[in-house]
Image: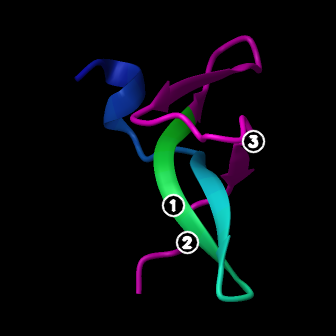
Amino acid sequence: MNKETAKRPELIAYTVTESGGENRYHRIGAAWQNSKGGYKIRLHALPLDGDILLLPPKDPA
C-alpha cells in the first residue's frame, strides 16, 4: 500500500444496477485526489454498462 492509498479515499466508485424496481449500488473501487487536483482511481471490478458513479464516502456510524 502506498502513501496515497493509505489515507481514506475522497470518493467511492460504484456501479448501479436495477433489480425489482430498486437501484442497487455495488462498490467497485475508490478515488484519491492527487497533488495536481486530479484523481487516482483504483478499481476492483468494471461495470457491464460502462458507467461508474463516484460519491463521497459515508461517515462512519
Badge nearest the viewer, 3 or 2: 3
Is residue 39 shown in magenta? yes
Q: Provide the residue designation for mark 3.
A: 51
Q: CA distance from mark 1 to mark 2?
A: 14 Å
The numbered dot on residue 58 is 2
| Residue placed most toward the observer, 22 or 9 | 22
Q: How is the image coloured?
A: rainbow
Q: Amino acid at mark 3?
A: Asp
Give the residue at x 72% y 50%: 53
Q: Which residue is mark 1?
A: 26
Other residues around mark 3 within 10 Å, as few (<14) / some (14–19) / many (≥20): few
Query: Mark 1–mark 2 contact, CB under 8 Å?
Result: no
Q: What is the spatial separation of the Cα atoms under label 3 and label 2, in whole angstroms? A: 21 Å
Please tell me whether mark 2 sits on a helix, a strand or a loop. Answer: loop
Please report the bounds of the magenta region as a residue range.
32-61
Placement of the C terminus among the 4 image quadrants:
bottom left
- Overall secondary structure of the magenta stretch? loop
Quadrant assignment for the N terminus: top left
Specify the farthest residue to the top: 36
- Count of marks, rendered view: 3
